[in-house]
Image (tube, rainbow, N blue to C red):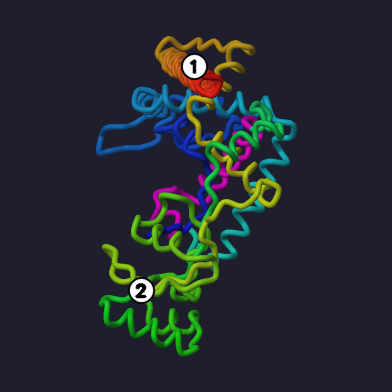
Amino acid sequence: MKKSLVKVVTGSAVMFLLAGCTPTKANENTEATADSQSEVIATIGDETISLDDFYAELKAKAGTATLRSMIIQKVLTQNVDDAEALKKSADEEVNAQIESAGGEQVFQQLLAYQNLGSIDDFRESVYIRNLFQEVIGKNVDTSEEAIKAYYESDYAPKMEAQHILVETEEEANAVIERLNNGEKFEDLAKELSTDSSSADGGNLGEFSVGQMVPEFEEAVKSVASGELVPEPVKSQYGYHVINVINNGEKKPYDEVKDEVKQQYLDSKYNDSNLAYNIVGKFIKEKGVEIKDEDLKPALDELMAAIEAAEESAKAAEEAAEETTAEGESEETEAEGAAAEDEAAEETTVAE
């Protein structure tokens, strides 16, 4: 089933770009004096660890990844209209999530459960997501034509359902009988369901294709929106009694164009090749020079990834053109065959 404790903060593309890095505060002053660099920061018996030793160890273990992350963040910050407004928006979003979770202590536990670091780390991640989404949004085709094309080829409506999860088929059939006798789904979910969604009356919220186990998704699609699935649905979790709120049937474009546009943008946010291409374009425009020889691999690795993304995008474009050409060729052949058949029929009639 679908589980989501903390709202997802970043698309896979930006996480891929920053892989292996803790979010860094790009504007933080990290300069240090010569005296502070040689300062002893720990003692172990008669031995000491200086700030120099500590920096050298960090640099060796995570220097290139951290620098790569900082370069990308700088590129993003330089290409948005108002970075401070995006940071304020990130703070407001996180504060709202903290309040919804029941306070900072509970929220920190949720973050720890999903390995998302501290609350400050999370704030920085949301800020990076905001930067990334604005940059991507300004550099992709969001014309009506592009959105309509996405609707025709890739748009998959979201679904929504409630369920009551029980251990046996007999229990599930008993629940369905009670529902058919007029009892409320929400009340039975709170009373009987073993799933965590029971507190919300069994409501799972919206979900996309592939987010639920196949048996559950197929059942949701099998009946009209607003209907109860007539039979229990078995999955690896037990037996589900399902009330379909939205079966994901594709509606006319004009009714869902805002949803289509958002799904289209989300697909772009999650496209790592696109992300690398856009970041690469800005890096080439601005120019990046790393003066520390030990850290130069950070740029080399980044540019290698950018070049690989460019090649992948080019190959995908060529494949799409080839597919289009094949389709046009088949269409032409079909038209030719139809014309020959028509001519043959006319000849037969004339005879």
Which mark is on residue 84?
Answer: none
Instruction: Name the residue at 62% across, 44% down.
Output: 260
Instruction: Name the residue at 49% across, 33% down.
Output: 13
Q: Which residue is mark 1?
A: 329
Q: Position of residue 288 (x, y in %)?
A: 56, 12
Q: Which residue type carries mark 2? A: Glu
Q: Which residue is mark 2?
A: 231
Q: Position of residue 124 (x, y in %)?
A: 56, 42
User: What secondary structure is found at the residue carrying circle 1?
Assistant: helix
Give whichever of 41, 317 is nearer the camera.
Answer: 317
Q: Is residue 142 shown in magenta? A: no
Q: Position of residue 285 (x, y in %)?
A: 63, 12
* Distance (Cα) linking label 2 and label 1: 48 Å
Q: Quick check: 146 left or right of 305?
A: right
What are the residue bounds of the magenta stretch? 108-136
Q: Position of residue 302 (x, y in %)?
A: 46, 18
* Dominant secondary-structure state across the stretch colored magenta: helix
Q: Is residue 127 shown in magenta? A: yes
Give whichever of 202, 161 is nearer the camera.
Answer: 161
